[in-house]
Image (cartoon, helix red, strand yellow):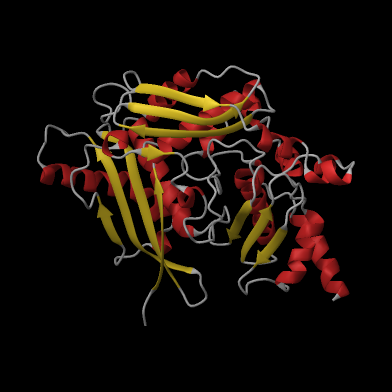
């Protein structure tokens, strides 16, 4: 019988797309720190020797785009002639930013419920920043209630960056990718780790060696010992002698980052979420202020799904929500538990509607989204722009809180009693 395999990938902060995500979110952090009512839609493009920042931004604070871009690139690790072909100090930075369209602004500032119906409800005041559909997901495969393939991929990417930045493997450069394939059993539970793939940018000379064969041998040995091995201890029962390892399978990887490939904000939406394990509505996160439901509603949907699984109401939970631009109340909310729920999905959907408010202003206030950068010394959203927006025990993300578990259990108990 064929194996049931599922694969997810992650990338390091030096990947050209992730570099752009981090610059866009650094701009968002700066705007919201100076003016929590800022409207931001910031896109970044990078290529050899050049960064271009564009978009629509309305803020009462001053934003030093060039300094933010250079500082972000330098902190990632691209600084100096030996940093991997891209240099924060010498690259060009072009800025092409204008204000938010007044047509969009009026629909967000005063939602249809207020304009047409005269609603006095505070949460009816702010309309969704765009139409669209968003998904949130959780499952019981890991302590952080994330799918194992993407969870382990992120941890490997973080470890790869850690050994580089701490100087443990000084020959590593910022660009890198990780990938994990998990085999599942007949009950859709992780059975074993089938394959690990790691590709990392590196110096052209390591310990005096320059041949591709010598470099490959050093990198293979070091990454298996210092990047992979810590997780074979943590997840020992899932690794076995049949687990396959592919370390820099293409061979030489000296040219990387924006010098090797152009980067663009929003091109790693599957890395940012659930590694393809759950559905995706198509909208990116980075560079968008919280009125953009592409971002904030995905955070809220993850919060719902995680609390449902945390409450033991399902092993897997996916929540979809949709909006119309300029309208506060969602057009639809749907829940799927894929046969793992303790009750019918329709009943669980009714409970979710009772417990959670998915209007944009309710989400913003629930998680304090407009004030998080200022409360964290000007650095919050940029930290989410690499290694995933969900299941991050290294970050204090409000949408990851299991603060609705008891309320859900109580509501579920009442629903079952009525049934």
Report whether 310 appears left or right of 203.
right
Q: Quadrant of the C terminus?
A: bottom right
In the rendered image, residue 64, in percent from the top left (x then y), is placed at: 51, 18
Figure disc tally: 0
Residue visible at 77% across and 53% down in the picture: 356
User: Height in image: 51 above or below 271?
Assistant: above
Front position in the image: 310 or 240: 310
In the rendered image, residue 281, in percent from the top left (x then y), is placed at: 56, 55
Tell which residue pokes out farthest to the bottom in this image: 1
In the rendered image, residue 188, in percent from the top left (x then y), is placed at: 51, 72
Residue visible at 29% across and 67% down in the picture: 242
Report whether 229 appears left or right of 247.
right
In the rendered image, residue 383, in percent from the top left (x then y), is placed at: 52, 35
User: Height in image: 67 above or below 413?
Assistant: above
Place residue 173 in its image quadrant. Answer: top left
Report whether 253 appears left or right of 236.
left
Q: Can you see residue 369?
A: no
Tell which residue pokes out farthest to the front in this image: 103
Report whether 319 appears left or right of 8.
right
Residue visible at 40% across and 66% down in the picture: 192
Front position in the image: 410 or 354: 354
Front position in the image: 220 or 372: 372
Place residue 206 in its image quadrant. Answer: top left
Front position in the image: 149 or 330: 330
Q: Quadrant of the N terminus?
A: bottom left
User: Height in image: 71 above or below 232?
Assistant: above
């Amino acid at each position: 019988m064929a194996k049931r395999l599922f694969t997810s990938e992650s990338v390091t902060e030096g990947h050209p797309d992730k570099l752009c995500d981090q610059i866009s979110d650094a701009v968002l952090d700066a705007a919201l720190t100076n003016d929590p009512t800022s409207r931001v839609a910031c896109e970044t493009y990078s290529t050899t020797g050049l960064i271009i920042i564009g978009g629509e931004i309305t803020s009462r604070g001053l934003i030093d785009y060039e300094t933010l871009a250079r500082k972000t690139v330098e902190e990632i690790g691209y600084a100096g002639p030996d940093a991997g072909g891209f240099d924060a100090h010498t690259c060009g930075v072009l800025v092409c930013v204008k204000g938010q369209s007044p047509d969009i602004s009026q629909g967000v500032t005063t939602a249809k419920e207020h304009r047409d119906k005269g609603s006095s409800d505070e949460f009816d005041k702010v309309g969704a920043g765009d139409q669209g559909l968003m998904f949130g997901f959780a499952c019981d495969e890991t302590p952080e209630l994330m799918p194992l393939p993407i969870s382990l991929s992120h941890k490997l990417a973080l470890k790869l960056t850690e050994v580089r930045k701490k100087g443990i493997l000084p020959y590593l450069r910022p660009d890198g990718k990780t990938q994990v394939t998990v085999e599942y059993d007949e009950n859709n539970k992780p059975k074993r780790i089938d394959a690990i793939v790691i590709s990392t940018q590196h110096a052209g000379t390591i310990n005096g060696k320059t041949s591709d064969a010598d470099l490959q041998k050093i990198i293979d040995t070091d990454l298996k010992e210092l990047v992979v091995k810590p997780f074979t201890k943590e997840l020992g029962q899932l690794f076995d002698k049949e687990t396959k390892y592919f370390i820099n399978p293409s061979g030489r990887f000296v040219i990387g980052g924006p010098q090797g490939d152009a980067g663009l904000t929003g091109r790693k939406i599957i890395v940012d979420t659930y590694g393809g394990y759950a559905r995706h509505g198509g909208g990116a996160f980075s560079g968008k202020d919280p009125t953009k439901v592409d971002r904030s509603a995905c955070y809220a949907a993850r919060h719902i799904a995680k609390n449902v699984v945390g409450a033991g109401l399902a092993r897997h939970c996916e929540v979809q929500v949709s909006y119309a631009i300029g309208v506060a109340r969602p057009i639809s909310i749907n829940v799927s538990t894929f046969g793992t729920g303790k009750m019918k999905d329709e009943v669980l959907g009714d409970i979710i509607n009772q417990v959670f408010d998915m209007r944009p202003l309710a989400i913003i206030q629930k998680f304090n989204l407009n004030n998080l950068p200022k409360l964290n010394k000007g650095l919050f959203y940029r930290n989410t722009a690499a290694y995933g927006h969900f299941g991050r025990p290294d970050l204090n993300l409000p949408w990851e809180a299991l603060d609705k578990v008891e309320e859900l259990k109580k509501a579920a108990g009442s629903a079952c009693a009525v049934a």
